[in-house]
Image (cartoon, grey):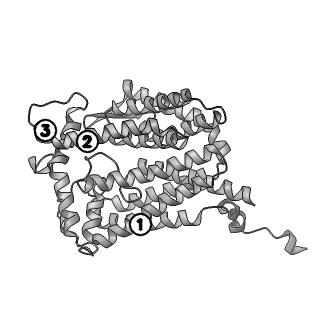
Amino acid sequence: MAAVLDTPSLWRRALPLFRGFDGPLAFAVFMLAGAGMLVMYSSGFDHGTRFVDHGRNMLLAGFILFVVAQISPQQLMKFAVPVYLTGVLLLLGVEFFGITRKGATRWLNVGIVIQPSEILKIATPLMLAWWFQKREGQRQPLDFVVAFVLLAVPVMLIMHQPDLGTSLLVAAAGLAVIFFAGLPWRLVAPPVLLALLGIGLLVWFSSDLCQDGVRWVVLREYQQQRVCTLMDPTRDPLGKGFHILQGMIAIGSGGVFGKGFMQGTQTHLEFIPERTTDFIFAAYSEEFGLMGNLFLIVAFVFLVLRGLVIALEAPTLFSRLLAGAVALIFFTYAFVNMGMVSGMLPVVGVPLPFISYGGTAMVTLGSGLGILMSIAKSRRLLQT
């Protein structure tokens, strides 16, 4: 009788909250988080409290992951419209009442200072997945037009701040949902071919287009400078090309096995700008070399593929579209960051997931992982 009346332990009561969590996905995240803490200790050891703060941000992301994972996909659908509309309204608020820092107006004071564009990284694919779920079984070409409008509104507002990096991430997440929803290839191929043609022409005529005094109509001046610097970073080695050149030097000097933990000269002599944020991949490469980079790439590839597997096995169209978009958000983050640090893409403000310092980005990453865990849990519950 006493055994029946025994109060279950706290662990036994909490265990159902973790049941259904995707083990392989959690393993990939732990590997990346461990690498992030390791390189942050090295690159930020003389940078105030960056290491401690990074650990705190990791815990915050883990807490958000846990909370969001408890919300079923059906409940997430109910949040789609209000979260999207709130995010767009906050972006409009930035236009009129935003805080300007370093020439960009991206922040809003609502009692605390927030960056509304971060909300749209999750809110936009959430809204688009909701839209296509509502139109399931009666989808028309006009539905894709509406989806593009829903995507264009936040992307244009974010680009106007200006914030090219975040607008790229929001656009990539939204386009992933639209593509997975069944956008015909005949509509996908022409813009892709035009983009490739434009890149080819830009490379061919870069020496003429990047001369002093030449102004492009499409891009702002600072965006034009970033593209021209990508074409030839040596044209301004101590100015606009400094970031890319130092990043490439650090990556190359790491060799196959790296210089060793805490032994990166480019990092600790402060040649690498933003070594704890956007350019932390250069600091990591210098100390852990090609083998360390391969570990990082494999971990990211595994994380993205696991997210796509969760998407394929999801029980509803909404879940499939949302999980696929979130998985590709992580791919875009990693691909763009590594590409810009390696000198293959223009420099934009995109952090490396779980590696770069940043509280707001970590909240976004935790929310995305929580959504993947929620969808994985819902599939397992249906199976049992």
**Residue type for callout 3:** Cys
Depth order, front residue of 99/66: 66
Q: Is residue 164 left or right of residue 110?
A: left
Q: Quadrant of the C terminus?
A: bottom right
Q: With respect to residue 256, does 137 lie above or below?
A: above
Number of the label disc, if any, that sits on residue 298 = 1
Q: Which residue is mark 3?
A: 210
3D distance between C-alphas at marks 2 and 3:
14 Å
Q: Which residue is mark 2?
A: 199
Quadrant hosting residue 210: top left
**Residue type for callout 2:** Ile
Q: Earlier in the sequence, mark 2 or mark 1?
A: 2
**Residue 232 rendering spot, x and y as whole percentages:** 14, 48
**Residue 115 rendering spot, x and y as whole percentages:** 41, 39
Q: Secondary structure at mark 1?
A: helix
In the image, which is nearer the foreground, mark 2 or mark 3? Answer: 2
